[in-house]
Amino acid sequence: MIHPADDTLPQLTLHLPDEAATLALGADMARILVPGLVFYLDGNLGAGKTTLVRGIMRGLGYEGKVKSPTYTLVELYAISRLNLYHFDLYRFADPIEWEEAGFREYFNAHSICLVEWPEKAGDWLPRPDMRVLLRMRDGGRTAELKAETEAGKRWLSQLRDTIHP
C-alpha cells in the first residue's frame, strides 16, 4: 500500500513499506508515461532504484528480465509504443565519459530515459523532468518525487490522480 505524505505540487512524498509497494509505484508510473520524459533516480546502493524500474517495466507489460545496467551502462526496452532507456552511471569515473559514450541521442521526444546515478555525468545530462529520490526508512522506503519542468509538473499531477482516484 502506498501512503502519501505530501499532497502539494510539484512534489510528492510516499512511504513504500516493502518491495511490493515499490513495484506498485512503478506500475502506477508506467500507466501515465509519455515519450520525451527524463527521470533521475537518486538513492544509495540498495535503495530500490532498479526495483522501481522493474515495476515500471511490468506496468508497461514487459515480461522479460529487468536488471541494473551497471556493466552495460544502458539497457534499451523497446515496448510497442516507446523506447525506454535505463541508464546506470555508477561506474563512471569522470563526467566526460557520458558524452564520450554517445548517449545524448537517446534523450529525445520519442524516448523515455531513466537514469540511475545521474550525478556521475555532472552537467552533461539534460535536465530531468522528474527526480525520484529513494531512501531506506522505517523498514521500507520513502520515495520523494520532484517535478523539475512543466512536463514533470503535469506528469506528477497525473500520477497523483492515478494513486488516489
Image (spheres, rainbow, N blue to C red):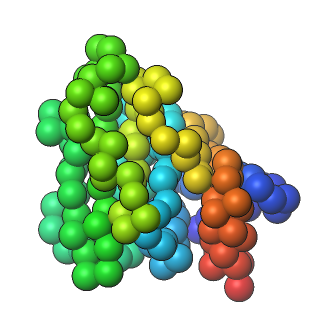
* In the image, residue 150 above or below residue 141: below
Residue 128 in view in this figure: yes
Q: Nearer the viewer, residue 15 or 157?
A: 157
Q: How many marks?
A: 0
User: Farthest residue toward the top?
Assistant: 93
Q: Is residue 90 left or right of residue 29?
A: left
Residue 15 in view in this figure: no
* Point 70% across, 78% down: residue: 161
* Point 32% across, 81% down: residue: 81
User: Farthest residue toward the right?
Assistant: 8
* Point 20% across, 74% down: residue: 63
Q: Nearer the viewer, residue 152 or 21?
A: 152
Where in the figure is residue 95, as x and y percent of width and height? Answer: 37, 20
* In the image, residue 88 above or below residue 31: above
Where in the figure is residue 142, as x and y percent of width and height? Answer: 61, 46
* In the image, residue 103 above or below residue 26: above
User: Farthest residue toward the bottom?
Assistant: 165
Residue 27's quadrant in the figure?
A: bottom left
Q: Nearer the viewer, residue 155 or 139?
A: 155
Where in the figure is residue 87, as x and y percent of width and height? Answer: 31, 43
Quadrant where the image shows the N terminus? bottom right
* Point 46% across, 23% down: residue: 122
Residue 99's quadrant in the figure?
A: top left
Where in the figure is residue 56, as x and y percent of width and height? Answer: 39, 66
Quadrant where the image shows the C terminus? bottom right
